[in-house]
Image (cartoon, rainbow, N blue to C red):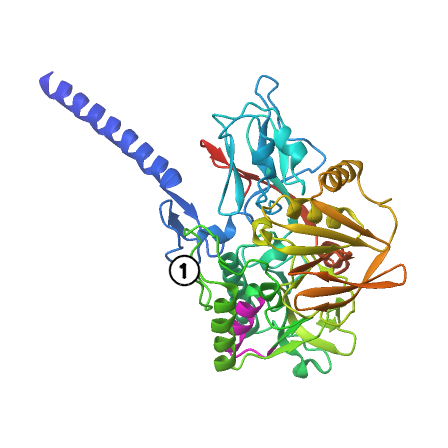
Amino acid sequence: MLVTTLVFVALTVLFAWWHVSRGRRAQPARASSRACPRCGAAVPRESEFCPACGVPMQAYELVTARVVDPKQAPAADPDVLPHPVVRTDVCVGCGTCVAACPEPGALRVVDHRALVDLDRCKGHGACAAACPVGAIVLARGAAVQRVEVPEVDANFETNVPGLYVVGELGGRGLIKNAINEGRIAVEHVARVLNAGGGRAQAPGAGDAYDVVVVGSGPAGLSAGLEARRLRLRYVVLEQGTLSDTIRKYPRSKLLLAEPSRVHLYGNLWVADASKEELLKVWEGVIERAGLRVRTGERVEAVERAGGLFHVRTPGTEYRAHRVVLAMGRRGTPRRLGVPGEELDKALYDIVEMDAFAGKRVLVVGGGDSAVESAVGVAGQPGTTVALSHRGTDFPRVKPRNLEKLEAAVGAGRVELLLGSRVLEIRAGVVALDGGGMHRLVPNDVVVIRIGGEPAYPFLERCGVRLVTREVALEAGAEQSAG
């Protein structure tokens, strides 16, 4: 009897221990690790890099985000006050929302981006109405950011086999992320081509490039350097000048305002520096590496035929086994075509409004983007703004933007130069023609917002699918959508 009891107790204890340890083995495995999207290896939650292939996990935050139906609104709780969500891919840090918010401390600008203190926010919505660039939306319940992006896998290859999208065009504009993505994509190109069967066997395919990289921003340069390191036959095409994306960046004092947790996987040097310092170092790296970049080559089409990609520019056609698109997300801006447009003072976009504080700014254009730029820049301390428009009114501008423009003009913050056109951009001045009269306008910066070809229609012509991904924001006292 005693033996039977002891055996029963021992079996019970053994079974209980086995059951608990089995649960413990199963639960922590799910809770303490995640699968690397690239190689499938287990990555500890606290690790920022995959221990097997070395890639940073942050490179995949957007790639692995949930795909949603853009027509279906996010779940809303009617009992929860609406709160602002800041799209940091749009926010230019002008501070207009801070001034408009009636709740002290609910909004503040940090590192040139607006942050929301949810404990202080009362859901008035004044910030969303005041934002000159539409970067703030009101949401109830979970704060999420929905963004339309190209559909790519863990190697940044699109649904078109052999066609990759990296950098800002893929939805992630941070320089370090762009560098990481460019290298990851080309590493995959090399693996596929060197594994055999990756190169087309069509007539003349032997003379085709292994990879054509479109764009010489951070992602494009990283992809090109990696292609050279891996001894691929490559070429980098740039519609403007070398590193045009960075060269036209408006802020000269400090280029990188990125979280320190974004780690570098690529082979370009990155640190807190001015754009001039960064360009100098990068150009030195490019020169020493002998990187081949063909400037002034605007890519108009990428088509696949006979097993090869045909990359067409106005004067040349390049054939390639693989193509990496590293163009800017904003597409190809339309240029004025006037002398002096190549000067660094001529910009085609605004990244941060405070870069224009104390400057004499001329905004050129008659659409929403021009009006939004003029109103936003006019809110900076010590800035004088003039808006040059060939027409005599603004028939294409949204009523909301028109109201803001009229208010800025009435307050003396924006000068309208209707019926005018730019003749020449010079150091210190801009030559204008208005009604047959020439005048020189004192000027430090020219912001050209006259339209252009958006990038996403170009992607769709290439056959790339676009999807809407929903990125959940981390819970906490402060939130912003990026």
Residue located beneath label 1 in the image:
54
Specify whether residue 233 is painted magenta: yes
In-front residue for pair 83/366: 366
- The part of the image, by quadrant, that contains residue 398 is top right
Question: Looking at the image, is 120 positioned above or below residue 115?
Answer: above
Specify whether residue 478 is painted magenta: no
In the image: residue 446, left or right of residue 196: right
Local packing at callout 1 (Cα closer than 10 Å; few below 14, some 14-19, many 20+) is few
Position of the C terminus by quadrant: top right
The prevailing secondary structure element of the residues shown in magenta is: helix
Q: Residue at x 39, y 51 (%)?
A: 48
In the image: residue 284, left or right of residue 405: left
The residue segment tinted magenta is 220-234
Q: Amino acid under label 1?
A: Gly
Q: Residue 339, how many percent across, how many down?
A: 75, 72
Any part of residue 119 in sight: yes
